[in-house]
Amino acid sequence: MRWSLEGSTPGTIVVPIMFHGIRQAGKKLLSGDETSITEEQFQSFVWYAQQHGFQTITSAQLSDFLHSNARIPQRSMMLIVDDRRPGTVENYLLPAAQENNWMVTLGWIIGNTNHDLWAWMERLNASGRLDIQAHGYNHAYITEQTSETVIRKEILNPIPIIEQHFGKRPVAFIWPGGNFTLLAVAIAHEGGYQLGFTAFSRGPLMFNWIPQGEQERLVADPLMTLPRSWSTDQTLPLDIGEQIGAAARAEAISNYPQEAEYYRMYCSGELPALADILPTSTP
């Protein structure tokens, strides 16, 4: 899969970035707000992503990439908006998405969504720019002390409701507060989720390469404990992603002769020519 002509080339990265609030231009961030950014910071991020050739992918595309190295842009990112923030989505994320042919992923909280809010979200979804995933039913943090009943409600109850309002089954569960447990991960698999996102900022994702911390390693299920960068880090996650992707690409080129010989000897096959897999031009 790593060397497939139909797949993503070595060094392809995905940078998932978590957004919360965006403060209107000219206004300062509120005291104590450590998750929001200013409109100026957001526009600076958009400009940097444009200049460096980043494109967005959806949760389903990420799942295909991580499972089978399906082809995606070499510099990919995900713009994930947590909680219920339709104003942030409509005023800031969607205009950027429409200008750049991007998608916006929503971590949507289901409980207490009134009729007007559903109508608003369905209207925004008609743009074709939203990738709506689950972020819990009541946004209850899941810990070792959380009952199985509550965990099941948080993880499983959003599925039919998201299908009803947006026409697609969610493939990703964005852990409320970033919290997860071994039992919760098992229930998420039971519900058919393919991915789970934490709130840990560990670095970019690559095929067969998911950075994990101690808490994630205890669960031993990297696809359900994916890291996400914070928007408050602005363009740093993209810059780090580019550097890691370039290093991975160089290492792949260096290792190709040995891998090709191994494949020839033990698998009785030939890998595609390196020049066909990795064109000399880079994005």
Image: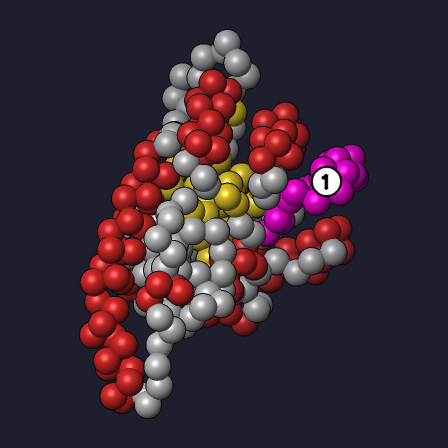
Is label 1 in a helix, a strand or a loop? loop
Q: From this view, report whether residue 220 is shown above or below residue 112.
A: below
Front residue of 275 and 137: 275
Q: How far across and how far down the image is residue 9, in percent?
A: 39, 60
Residue 147 at what x, y percent from top left?
48, 60
The colour scheme applied to this rendered structure is secondary structure
**Which residues are the magenta region?**
112-133
Could you tell whether 249 is left or right of 50 in the image? left
Q: Residue at x 64, y 55 (%)?
A: 158
Looking at the picture, tell me which residue is in the foreground, 78 or 224: 78
Residue position for label 1: 127
Residue 195 locus on image (x, y percent): 48, 60
Please identify the quarter of the rendering in which residue 89 is found: top right
Question: Is residue 183 part of the magenta span, yes or no?
Answer: no
Q: Nearer the viewer, residue 141 or 65?
A: 65
In the picture, measured across the screen, residue 236 lies left or right of residue 27, that is: left
* Residue at 39% from the left image edge and 21% from the top image edge: 32
Q: Amino acid at mark 1?
A: Ser
